[in-house]
Structure formats: structure tokens, C-alpha cells
Amino acid sequence: MKNSFGQSVAVTIFGESHGAAIGAVIDGLAPGIEVDESFIAFQLEKRKGPSKVSTARREKDACRILSGVFEGKTTGTPICVMIENDEQKSKDYSKTKDLARPGHADFTAFCKYHGFQDYRGGGHFSGRITAPLVAAGAIAIKALESKGIRIGTHVLSCGGINDRKFENFDDDFTLLSSLSIPVLDEKARKAVEEKIVEIRADGNSIGGVLQTVVTGMPAGVGEPWFDTVEGVLSHALFSIPAVKGVEFGAGFDFAYMTGEKANDPFRMGEKGVVTETNNNGGINGGITNGMPILFNLAIKPTPSIYKEQKTVDFIKNENSLIKIEGRHDPAIIHRAAVVADSVTAITLCDILAVRFGTDFLKG
């Protein structure tokens, strides 16, 4: 399995949903970067989401840093973060272990690992494994902030309810840091929460679209052809289990534009070259142009629903029906926002280190 990502700053994840622990190893971060354990805990708490619209599985998510940090600063050696699992109910999965849950990786994992995979709660394919990514991402986020680079993600749409787009980035970032459901408009936030509660009552689930913005990235970062900023970010973002689509800037709307409308006119601003519009999401030719990086993520509905579904028994090789038990999210989108921030931060640390060297991130 390719459980490692990154060239200069790399992250490796390990563990299973119902195993003893999950974790990540970050290698390549420069020495001297401040590590704020209270911020790691804050980010992990955001990933849980409010219980009213999230899974009933409430892990403590107490993160332990086993190596690579001394007296609150990175040492330059591999950082290992570990989170123990203490809220498993594995019996929920024993009755259906040979049935392929629709939308899950049960069947594909069986085909690849010949039945030796840990099937409980999705095993290594579970969204639970995003917790150590968030812990690692918290370190990366603070490293980027020391260089004036900030990241924010909000729920752009969910269940036919649309949030407003980013306006004042600094104010919106501050607002998002205080929200358990990351929707910028208060009225839309309440409507999204009510929609998820309604979906949960029906035993169903719902998806939506996340929007992420990165400010403060310097121009000239990216490695065409095959390690473009869009390419590397997409590679990493598609590792988030619920992500099924990524678009940068205007994205698929480009297909309906003329060149005159799609192009971003260049002008001289107070601090240098800027563009009047940002249809290209801060990237030209796979290289950052200094404008905010903007992209949307399509988040699929949580595949675990409480309705009877058609499936197969892949041991008996026969058709079957399945009705899933256990504790599951009616929506993952609000919890995925902090994961998107974290994966983006880890990836940008790597991209910047490739361009400027690992010491660039040193505080």
C-alpha cells in the first residue's frame, strides 16, 4: 500500500478503525518549528463535529507525540503522532463481514488483500484514519502561518442549501475557527444543520461541496508537467475517503465560458502583480501566481445508511441484502472541512520545501 505521500516533507499514516491505535509519521520538517499541542487538540475536536449531526462514536482523540519534538519545537527528525482507539464496538460488523457494503471498500479490499484485511469499521479505509492526518496537519498549518500562509474551508453547499462565498479572508478564517459546522452565513448554517438532522431521522445520508482557499502563497511555486500545484494537491485531496471530485477556480464552469470571460487580466497592485479576477484559482501553468488558491471538493454522502440495500456475499458468491447497524454519520461534509485544511497544509509544506528547501518553513 502507498501509505506515504510527499517528496521533501512526507507523511505516512498507519492503523485501523478498530485497532489499538492510529497515527502518522511526518518526515522532512525543518528543525525549530513550533508545535502547539493545544492547537492539535483543538483541530481534532473540530474533526469530531457536533453529536447532533455526527456519529455517536465519540473517541477521546488524545494525541501523543512520540518523537521529533523537544521542548515544544521540531527537532528535524521524524515526528510520530499516535491516537489510541478506545470507543470501538466491533461486534456491529461481525454479522456482515462477508457482505459488501454498498459504497464502501469491503469488496475491493477483499480482492486486493485476499481476506486478510481488517474489516471492522472499514479497517484502514475508514474515515477514522483522517484523525492522525488532522494532527499532522495542525503542525503543518502552524508552520505555514509563520510564513503568512493561511487556509480555510467552508461548506459551500449541502442538501440544496448554499453558503455565501469567501469575502474578507481574514475575517472569514477567524469566523470558521469558531464554528463546529463551517458555514459562513448564519441562516444557511442553521438550515444545513436542520437538513442533516432530517436526513438522519430518515436513516439516510447526504453529501455536498466544500470550498477551500489558501492565501499568502508566493508566486512561482509548482513543478510542471507532472507535479503541478493542481496535480499534487489533487493527488493528496483524493486520499480523503469522501472526496469524489476536485475543481480549481471556475473549474467545470470553464466549459461554458469564452476566453474573454475566463482569462484573469493582470494588473499592478500595491504589493506587485495581481489579477482582476481569479477564475484560475491562483494557478497558471501549474504554478502559483500569487493570488489566493481556490478549489472545491465534491463530498459524497456517507455510504453507511440504515436502509436495506442490495449487495452480494463475496464468500458464497451469491446475491444478498444488507441492513447496516452500528454508529454512522448522516453527513461527513462538516467534519471533512478540517481534514481538507490539514491535507492541504501538509501538501503545501511539501511543495514549498521542494521549491525553496526544507529550511523555508523554519520559524
Image (cartoon, rainbow, N blue to C red):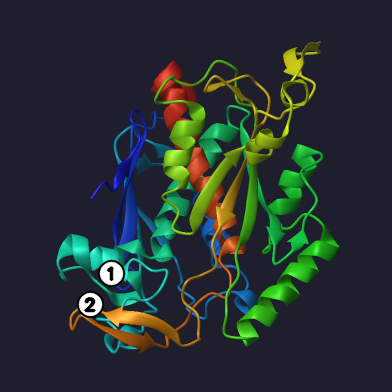
Mark 1 or mark 2: name the one nearer the start of the chain: 1
Q: Position of residue 140 (x, y in %)?
A: 48, 39
Describe the element under mark 1 as helix, strand or loop.
helix
Q: Residues within 10 Å of mark 1 (few under 14, many from 20)?
A: some
Query: Residue 73 at x, y = what percent?
Result: 43, 38
Query: Which residue occupies the foreground of this view, 298 or 93?
Result: 298
The answer to whether 300 is drawn above or below residue 145 in the figure is below
Determine crowd level at label 2: few under 14, some 14-19, many 20+ residues with C-alpha closer than 10 A.
some
* Residue at horizontal 39 percent and vertical 25 percent from the top: 226
- Residue at 32% of width from left, 76% of height from top? 100
Residue behind mark 1: 107
Front residue (pair 228, 42): 228
The type of residue carrying mark 1 is Phe
State the image coordinates of residue 93 (x, y, percent, origin top left): 32, 83
Q: Are marks 1 and 2 in contact (CB under 8 Å)?
A: yes
Residue type at mark 2 is Phe
Work out whether residue 8 can be spotted.
Answer: yes
